[in-house]
Image (cartoon, coloured by chain):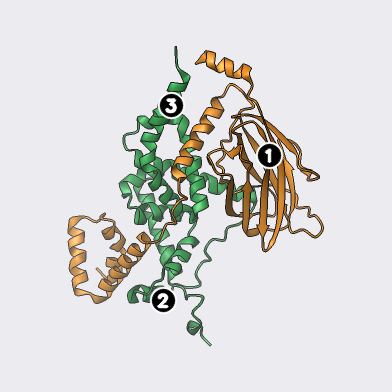
Chain colours: A green, B orange
Amino acid sequence: MVNLWSNSAYNKNRFENLVSPHIDHLYRLSYRFTGSREDSEDLVQDLLVKLYPRLEEIEAIEKLKPWLAQVLYRLFIDRTRQHKRSVLSVVEDSMEPDSQLDGGAGTEELAAGTLTRERLQESFAVLNEDQRALLSLHDIEGYTLAELVDVLDVPLGTLKSRLNRSRAKLREHLSREPFVENQRVNR
Amino acid sequence: MSCTNHQDLFDEYLDGDLGESQSAQLLSHIEACGACQTKLEQLLVLRNALRQMPVEPARAGFAQAALRQARLAHAAEKSPNPQATGSREPFFRHWFVAGFGGAMAAGLALWAVFTLIGPVQPISEPPMFKLAVLETRDVNLAINVPEDMDGVTLTVELPENFEISGYHGKQQLAWQTRLKKGRNVLTLPVVAMKQGQGQLVARVAHNQKSKLLRVNLQANPADKTSLMAIDLKA
């Protein structure tokens, strides 16, 4: 006879033992993707709800951390796209630059070591969700290109060009004149 | 190779994705070229700054609450009692489901309606919502707003014999969110912990204006027949 209660408690422990060590990392990754605590908690909780019934599949995963990152990334992208459709809202993407500003303000700030956290966060937030996720995974959280080929399920060449475009967009935004610095405005 | 050619390789170099000979050639150029040295330093500064961008910590107890919610959602899905369905949706769903509508009550910033597994109806008096002890059911709050609103504060207060699934022992929950123009639906998976009555009070506040939403809750004794059936199976 199967004891449902014991079995349920056993499953709970198996799931928690496997997943708990990764929750902090998943939350941090979610925060990088979404930029807010509420959205990050929401995303991680949604992920756990979806994973719970897949206990046996999870147990068979050799490298759980990148696998979890992959599921989280897909969930994030799906939800973001669903959200855009459901609320009929347009998230403003970065405007294209009028011209490339080689040696612009952002470059000066980088050289002078005066790049502020706020300015970086503002520029990071301008990236679209794919670009933010990619830079979060690679440049911030240190996933290797080889790992990301699996996580994002894209060929290495595609991954590199997406990464380059994301970095270029970030740098381009940083190179624009900071909005608040009146002294930079030409009269 | 020109400086531009060398600089095109910087990201690959920092990624550790450049072969040994190319790396050596690049380093040799950088040693002799101040402009490229500066460019590389800038990239390093940017990467370090990215890694140091702060992460606001999750609320205390979040991990345990999220694990519990996952377990409850799974248990509810497998429950033989179709009414005892817990929500698969996370509680902190502040990406509300936006619908259509947008009617406003005169003089109020917000016009609120409840939907209790049924059609939308304007509030007249607090509706009664009955559930069995240990049963989880969704209470859906529909909030119509005339325009997009950022920085809306939602507060939910529960009587002591009720909880929101996944938030054990918390009688008051508050968080900030945004509302989209039209109808926004917030789903609260309410659990009856013990027999009794009480009132759920939700407060929606925005720009010094607020609106209270009330739902009467009644927890009845659990259905002994179904409990017996579960005992027998166990």
Identify residue type, mark 2. Answer: Gly
Q: Residue at x 54, y 61 (%)?
A: A93
As helix, strand or loop, the secondary structure at mark 3 comes to helix
Residues at marks 3 and 1 touching, judged by CB atoms closer than 8 Å: no
Residue B5 visible? The answer is yes
Q: Residue at x 33, y 49 (%)?
A: A143
Disc 3 from disc 2: Cα separation: 60 Å
**Residue of label 2:** A104
Q: Position of residue B86 (x, y in %)?
A: 58, 33
Residue A153 visible? The answer is no
As helix, strand or loop, the secondary structure at mark 2 comes to loop
Disc 2 from disc 1: Cα separation: 62 Å
Q: Residue at x 47, y 43 (%)?
A: A74
Of the pair B103 and B12, the residue shown nearer to us: B103
Disc 3 from disc 1: Cα separation: 32 Å
Q: Are marks 2 and 1 on the same chain?
A: no
Q: Position of residue B158 (x, y in %)?
A: 63, 43
- The part of the image, by quadrant, that contains residue B7 is bottom left
Q: Is residue A119 above or below residue B231?
A: below
Q: Chain of mark 1?
A: B
Of the pair B194 and A17, the residue shown nearer to us: B194
Identify residue type, mark 1. Answer: Gly
Q: Residues within 10 Å of mark 3 (few under 14, many from 20)?
A: few
**Left-right relation of B169 to A15:** right
Q: Position of residue A163 (x, y in %)?
A: 38, 56
Q: Position of residue A55 (x, y in %)?
A: 42, 29
As helix, strand or loop, the secondary structure at mark 1 comes to strand
**Residue of label 3:** A9
Identify residue type, mark 3. Answer: Ala
Q: Chain of mark 2?
A: A
**Residue of label 1:** B198
Of the pair A68 and B28, the residue shown nearer to us: A68
